[in-house]
Image (cartoon, grey):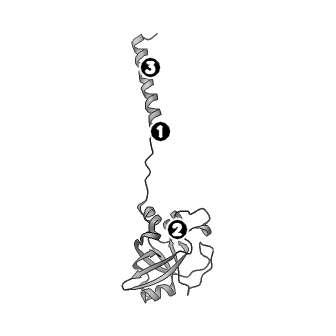
């Protein structure tokens, strides 16, 4: 049917293909990691500060399963940060980020708050939503609505 040299070339080609397929299956796969996720993993011990926007909201039943009032010193953390926090599962009540204390800085002032909620409307991964009383004690004026802040895990 085919000349012997063509059969030999076909056999060599298939052998080389199988060899590369076998070798490539054992090769490590490159994993792309989010810098924010890696930073977050080390955040508790590193003292890293995050920069984002702060807004205020009227809390109720939060993603961590707790009901809070406007006078509480709590925050809702950006949804991507909440959802990707190491150890997070499909049940937000069990997220290890829940009840973590943070310190928020605005100008020369700072306040301490506890993470008890997830902010679906926060655009940046380091954005937070504070209770109105916490926002007012840090910023002084609810009329500002949105301010640039830095914060860190305690």
Q: Earlier in the sequence, mark 1 or mark 2?
A: 1
Q: Earlier in the sequence, mark 1 or mark 3?
A: 3
Picture residue at 45% right of the left edge, 66% below the top: 42
Image height of 123 relative to 139, above or below = above
**Real-space CA distance between mark 1 and mark 3, rounded to the nearest whole angstrom:** 23 Å
Residue 8 in view, yes or no:
yes
Q: Secondary structure at mark 1?
A: loop
Q: Secondary structure at mark 3?
A: helix
Label placed on residue 73: none
Q: Which residue is mark 3?
A: 11
Picture residue at 44% right of the left edge, 19% below the top: 11
Picture residue at 62% right of the left edge, 69% below the top: 93
Picture residue at 44% right of the left edge, 24% below the top: 15
Confirm or deny contact between disc 1 and disc 3 (CB under 8 A). Answer: no
Image height of 111 relative to 30, above or below = below
**Real-space CA distance between mark 2 and mark 3, rounded to the nearest whole angstrom:** 55 Å
Q: Which residue is mark 1?
A: 26
Q: Earlier in the sequence, mark 2 or mark 3?
A: 3
Please tell me how crowded label 2 is: few (under 14), some (14-19), or many (20+) other residues with Cα within 10 Å: many
Q: Position of residue 14 (x, y in %)?
A: 45, 24
Q: Which residue is mark 2?
A: 82
**Real-space CA distance between mark 1 and mark 2, rounded to the nearest whole angstrom:** 34 Å
Label 1 or label 3, whichever lies nearer to me, is 1
Q: Position of residue 1 (x, y in %)?
A: 46, 9
């Amino acid at each position: 049917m085919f000349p012997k040299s063509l059969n030999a070339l076909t056999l060599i080609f298939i052998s080389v293909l199988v060899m590369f397929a076998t070798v490539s299956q054992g090769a490590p796969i490159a994993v792309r990691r989010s810098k924010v996720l890696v930073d977050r993993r080390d955040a508790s011990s590193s003292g890293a500060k995050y920069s984002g926007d702060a807004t205020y909201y009227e809390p109720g039943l939060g993603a961590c399963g707790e009901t809070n009032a406007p006078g509480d010193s709590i925050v809702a953390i950006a949804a991507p940060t909440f959802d990707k926090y190491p150890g997070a599962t499909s049940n937000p009540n069990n997220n290890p980020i829940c009840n973590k204390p943070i310190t928020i800085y605005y100008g020369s002032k700072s306040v301490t708050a506890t993470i008890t909620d997830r902010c679906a409307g926060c655009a940046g991964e380091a954005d937070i939503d504070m209770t109105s009383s916490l926002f007012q004690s840090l910023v002084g004026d609810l009329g500002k609505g949105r301010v640039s802040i830095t914060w860190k895990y305690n």
